[in-house]
Amino acid sequence: MIKLVRNPDIYHGKNERSNFFEGWYFKLVQPRTGDTYCFIPGIFLGKEGNSHIFIQVLKGNEKNFKYLRYRENQFKASTSEFNFQVGGSSFSLKGISLDINQQYERIFGTLYFDNIVRWPDSAINPGSMGFYNYLSFMQCYSQVCAVDGNIRGKLSINGRIVDFTGGKLYIEKNWGKAFPYSYIWAQGNSFNDGDGSITCSIAHIPMPFPMKSFTGFLIGIYAKGKFYKFTSINRSSLSISCEEEKVILKTYNKNYFLKIEAFYKQGTFMKLYAPRDGNMIPVASETLQGELNVTLFDKKRGSMIFNDRSSSAGIEFSENYMDLIYK
């Protein structure tokens, strides 16, 4: 148990039989065109014989989504490191090797990952969720595996060779019983100046009686070689507002102030599948064509640390995400 808590990257489902999911999110940005792809491999263990393995494939610029199912015996995972297989495809922190041939999707090739930036953690606060990883009753756990990274290699995607060399990488994962019913998520690391990465997750966190449910958030920004955290754990404050096709997040602690403006077009969203009520159903909407304006300010020095705009940003909402804004 302690090994899993302190190593949130690795597979957590070895002893699970039902009412469990685990999925990894690999976001890849092609450096010259900005075309953005996402592969979400995972496992779902249901209660009514609907357990299966899956890979969700998102082609952001085509607004194309596929949910590919595999048999349970087509999943193999290491219990000591971030390394697992779905069918003929393998996934790790060092790279991915894809061999997909389903639903008119033929994707194969190998990509290597370099210069991985990790979310700083400790034994007391392991991973990006920190001490919440020690609580066994959480509905959903989250881990940012790679805040930023570079890609080498090519993929053949339905007969077209896509060279990702020099492109940007982001990896995270979720596991538990179900996805949050209300959440907002945003991520970007394709900034105009070429440096920096930001990830943001805000969700309604249900708690068992007599504890009270709350809005939890994990926001991390890597800028100019340094990592800054704004989270529920370190007692940062957060405000959320929205305008037409725009969400504005403001968070601060005693040292820093961060503002994120997330821009999106409604017509670019794709429905994603997530675990809810014992099934994998399309409850999430995501675009890979978003843009993020990010400003980080040093309150004590009265100076700007970071001010830039990221294209090819991922922005995702649950169906009732507005509950987080008008709570």
Image (spheres, grey):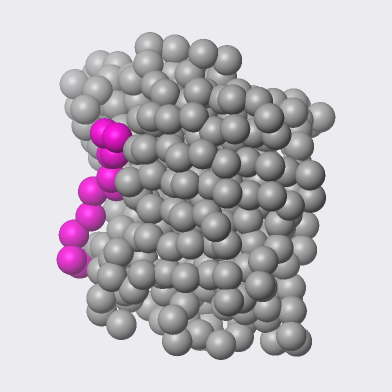
Residue 155 visible, this angle: yes
Q: Nearer the viewer, residue 242 or 46?
A: 46
Q: Report x, y in % for residue 147.
A: 36, 40
The quadrant in which the C terminus is found is bottom right
Q: Nearer the viewer, residue 245 or 192?
A: 192
The quadrant in which the N terminus is found is bottom left
Region rendered in magenta: 114-124
Residue for point 20% across, 67% down: 124
Q: Report x, y in % for residue 208.
A: 53, 83
Q: Does the magenta run of residues contain 123? A: yes
Q: Does the magenta run of residues contain 292? A: no
Q: Report x, y in % for residue 232.
A: 39, 55
Quadrant in the rendering for residue 126: bottom left
Q: Nearer the viewer, residue 219 or 232?
A: 219
Magenta region, mostly helix, strand or loop? loop
Residue for point 77% across, 63% down: 281
Q: Nearer the viewer, residue 281 or 248?
A: 281
Residue for point 19% across, 21% down: 301
Q: Report x, y in % for residue 28.
A: 51, 34
Say if 178 sits above or below 119 in the image. below
Say if 192 sits above or below 180 in the image. above
Say if 207 sits above or below 271 in the image. below
240 relative position to 13: left or right: right
Residue for point 50% across, 85% down: 16
